Amino acid sequence: MSKAKITKISICLALVLALVGGGIVYYNVAMKGDASVTNEAAARDESVPDDGVVYIEPEMVSLAGALSGNADSQAAAKAAFDLVNAKRQEAGLGALTWNSGLEQASAVRAVEASQSFSHTRPDGTDWWTVNSNLMYGENLAKGYATADEAVTAWMNSPTHKANIMDTEFTSGAIAIHIGSNGQWFWAQEFGF
């Protein structure tokens, strides 16, 4: 690989890191009628080597800042985040802090969930590869139109609830993508 190409890749990676942040991941899904979450939550496998390399997909760069949703979905995402923190505090756990890098990763995963509702990305890679430096846990849901419905579904699923109540998670974010048919796709990402 040429020195110019390595420099270009390094600059792109620095830009992405500046825009997005870094992490590892967990995942889950629940359902109600047409609404659902994944069969289980996702957690990054402990066997994944920490090689110091940050894996960020090219679409993360192109989508960063472009996935703002509408005012209703943004308000619902923030309301769900507040509900998650209320559940954590009821259990005697610390509140999660909102992480803008995880917010961008959540936005990408919400769009991807509308294409393939799974903790495997549409290209066949693991969910945490959106931003391997930040993402350590993931919950997905679809079809819920309120924060209360989505958080209730996650809390009623043992694996999703485990992500929410994980004492090691200190940060998070939630994003919603509204599909072409009006269905809401929720992605909740967790970090350390």
Image: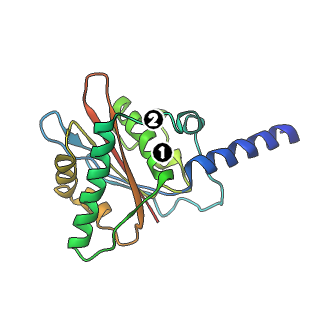
Q: Quadrant of residue 53?
A: bottom right
Q: Please report the residue visible at 27 percent of the width from the left and 47 percent of the height from the top.
A: 29
Q: Is residue 24 left or right of residue 61?
A: left
Above or below for 112 versus 161: above
**Residue 72 versus residue 16: which sits nearer the camera?**
72
Residue 127 numbered tag? none
What is the three-letter code of the residue carrying label 2?
Leu
Residue 2 visible in the displayed image: no
Name the image quarter holding the N terminus: top right
Say which element carries label 2. loop
Q: Is residue 19 left or right of residue 166?
A: right
Give the residue number, with chain letter if any, for mark 1.
Answer: 104
Give coordinates of residue 166: x percent, y percent: 33, 68
- Of all residues, the one furthest to the bottom in this rendering is 92
Count residues near mark 2 (Cα–Cα under 10 Å), then give few for <14, some for 14-19, many for 20+. Answer: some
Residue 85 visible in the displayed image: yes
Give coordinates of residue 3: x percent, y percent: 87, 42
Q: Quadrant of residue 186?
A: top left
Give coordinates of residue 95: x percent, y percent: 34, 68
Q: Is residue 152 left or right of residue 16?
A: left
- Of all residues, the one furthest to the front in this rendering is 71
Please tell me which of labels 2 and 1 falls first in the chain. Answer: 2
Give the residue number, with chain letter if any, for mark 2.
Answer: 67
Give coordinates of residue 75: x percent, y percent: 30, 44
Q: Is residue 143 left or right of residue 5?
A: left
Marks 2/1: CA–CA distance: 8 Å
Above or below for 90 versus 180: below
**Residue 128 versus residue 176: which sits nearer the camera?**
176
Count residues near mark 1 (Cα–Cα under 10 Å), then give few for <14, some for 14-19, many for 20+. Answer: many
What is the three-letter code of the residue carrying label 1?
Gln
CB atoms of marks 2 and 1 within 8 Å = yes
